Image (cartoon, rainbow, N blue to C red):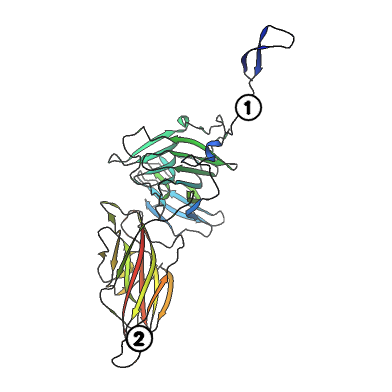
Amino acid sequence: MPITNIGKVEQEGNSSPVNVNVVNTTVPITNQFEPAAIDAFGRQRMSTPFTLADYSHVYGEDTELLTKTSGTSSTITFDITKAKAILTVGTGANDFTIHQSRMYHHYMPGKSQMTLQSFNFTGSRLGTNKRIGLFDDNNGIFFLQSGDGTKAIVLRSNVSGSVYDETVTQNNWNIDKLDGTGPSLFNLNTTQTQLFTADFQWLGVGRVRAGFVHNGDIIIAHEFYNSNNKPSVYWSNPNLPVRCEIRNYSGLAAGTDSFDQICATVVSEGGYTEAGVDFAAVNTSTRSVATTSKLPLIAISLKTGYYGKPNRSVVRANALNVYTADNAISYEFWRLPSTGSISGGTWTSANNESVVQYNEGGTSVNFTSGTLINVGFIIAGGQGAGQFSSSNQTTSISSAKRGYISQNIDSTDSNVFVIVATGIGAGSSNTRANIQWRETR
């Protein structure tokens, strides 16, 4: 161990000062994991995280994780016994497989947002990159393993007008290189399961941290400092999805490559309130509801774009109203996978300031892969010629974390909320409905 001279001291019984050397035992006066005990804003982490979303493969495919592939051998399969998704890429020079959350997790200014994601890269192959993190094609933070095995933490941004990856390789990580020589003594091995973590303060100019969880300790590997270092915001959009990606960057001789995605979560630290903007849409005229089929009274979905950008908003239904003037009806409230699930009618912008479009003229519904959220009955009160009867009901919609609609990976097709109705009594019923929703952007 190194010897350190601490200066001259006086010995008892000797008036002359002498030099004293002591062994440097390197006893820290602070915890080596102290940086991880505070959130991205420097506040002590408390037990009040709010889960924005969570994803696992305990029962196979998580329906809120979407797949995009290129190449005949590029696939995603699932191993329920090991609770994982297996991302596989083919042999083509540009083949890829992406597994990405439908939700773009809303960042609340002033709150630290954190992600935890478990995986196993299962080794490396020349010509193939593997990525995991909170990112999309334009912005984000992720862990990268290149084909030659080089590891890096990457801050992606399209603020300049084109996508730029600020790539920091392992030997340049500024907190802990995770090669066994840092304060944690942790040596990162991507052929074994790992737990990647990242958190950030946005406000356009805050810091971003990334690292790994090992033996219960959060080990920060690298921090990106953006304030006073860059001329503009570091991301154009802090609302980002969970994403795993395996992608070839050159032609390969034969075979495929893969890695395992296990589990992920995104949390807002220090609480969260889903602030947003409320809108509503209503049938402008009554719809004739027969007893022989289910008629879509009114449906809403997201516009593909908003102010020239991909529409990455999240929309939740707050309430619905259903009205019948004649005979009793039953109604159902559905979440459907695609705007193509609704036939007939026209999609119309709800408002220039809204991210939503609505359809009040649909003629039929394809319920395949849809989810029935709510059901009810509307009973007409009066009977007889000349009498007007109606019933109005307001229903609170589920606030479940997955009770929302959003766009697909490419922002070209949205989920749909729709109210459908079927007549119960004899004859058709003149019916109207409306949906009130909240948009979080």
> Is 332 located above or below residue 12 in the figure?
below
Asked whether, in this view, residue 190 is left or right of residue 381, the answer is right
Q: Pointer 1: what residue?
A: 27
Q: Secondary structure at mark 2?
A: loop
Residue found at the very far bottom of the displayed protein: 385
Three-letter residue code for mark 2:
Asn
What number of labels is visible? 2
Q: Pointer 2: what residue?
A: 327
Asked whether, in this view, residue 302 is left or right of residue 39, the answer is left
Placement of the C terminus among the 4 image quadrants: bottom left
Separation of disc 2 and disc 1 at Cα? 82 Å
Out of 304 and 351, give the one closest to the viewer: 351
Residue 76 falls in which quadrant of the image? bottom left
Q: Earlier in the sequence, mark 2 or mark 1?
A: 1
- In percent of width and height, residue 102 lies at 40, 56
Residue 121 visible in the snapshot: no
Three-letter residue code for mark 1:
Val
- In percent of width and height, residue 209 lies at 46, 39
Placement of the N terminus among the 4 image quadrants: top right
Crowding at label 1, few (<14), some or many (≥20) Cα neighbours within 10 Å? few
